[in-house]
Amino acid sequence: MEPSRKMEFFQKLGYSREDVVRVLGKLGEGALVNDILQELIRTGSRPQTQEGQATSAAPLLVPRGSCGVQESARRALGAAGKEDCGGPASSLRPIVIDGSNVAMSHGNKEVFSCRGIQLAVDWFRDRGHTSIKVFVPSWRKEPPRSDSPIREQQVLEELERQAVLVYTPSRKVSGKRVVCYDDRYIVKVAYEQDGVIVSNDNYRDLQSENPEWKWFIEQRLLMFSFVNDRFMPPDDPLGRRGPSLSNFLSRKPQPPEPSGQHCPYGKKCTYGIKCKFYHPERSRHAQLPVADELRAKTLAWPGRGA
């Protein structure tokens, strides 16, 4: 890849021109893209959001192994949100979309459907997300072939013009295509930006390859389904006992409701503490069994002693 194209590629990822020039000066203009990216990460360079703010508060995640490791990682992830300030968009996590996975899912695993990528991007835009990146291998720009059909290829061109889509590099050597591993780009960028990965791939190979990514992939992978032309992520991305979708996508999650459904009997309920429903009138004190509540009220009447 030519130096000018390398510079354009890394600037699309959010790295500053100064950082890229510094690394190219160290490694040489003929350095491979993966080596440049690894050096940028090693030297502490951080990509910027579309608003131009550096995400310098990217978390330091450590491998699981002790009871306090996950809690430390969660605190580190939360610190990024506390330092972020601004409008509503700043409270939403960056989105990194696995373009190939989304397109093939929309094409029923038979066709690379670019419309699926557009539907996913539009869904996050409608929610207020402004930092959205889509990764697609660069060979998808080539004319479609019978063994790799592609639909609505112009969608990729439009998203690239909007600086939303990034092509991962590939080239031909002796007539054979050499393709860089786009999954690694997806996970690296999402990890650095403390964002969310949109894919139905579990990235098991990358979890095993880099322990620092294991917890991140487990906690920040947003799966999805397509119902006709409707992009539908789950309302409970981490399971029924996990956070809601809104909290999952937010840097500053809202606390959950104190309980679930209100008791249909209200104040007439006689189950006391055994009642599985929510009683707002009992929210400020412990829910005692009915007998204990009556005993406490009786002792509180004038003229009655303990």
Image (spheres, rainbow, N blue to C red):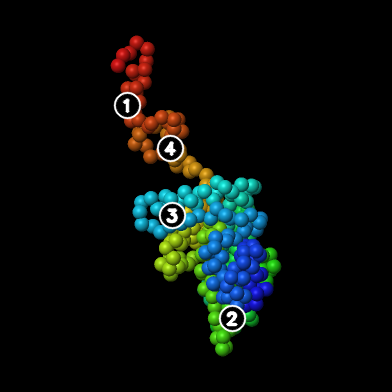
Q: Earlier in the sequence, mark 1 or mark 3?
A: 3
Q: Is residue 269 above or below residue 28?
A: above
Tag in front: 1 or 3: 3
In this rendering, position of residue 16 left or right of residue 106: right
In this rendering, position of residue 106 left or right of residue 4: left
Task: Assess whether mark 4 and mark 1 are in contact (beta carbons under 8 angstroms).
Answer: no
Circle on res. 278: 4
**Alpha carbons under labels 1 and 2: distance apart:** 77 Å
Q: Residue furthest left?
A: 306
Q: Earlier in the sequence, mark 2 or mark 4?
A: 2
Q: Which residue is mark 2?
A: 171
Residue 90 horizontal/vertical position (percent): 61, 50
**Alpha carbons under labels 3 and 2: distance apart:** 41 Å
Task: Assess whether mark 4 and mark 2 are in contact (beta carbons under 8 angstroms).
Answer: no
Q: Earlier in the sequence, mark 1 or mark 4?
A: 4
Q: Which residue is mark 3?
A: 239
Q: Which residue is mark 1?
A: 292
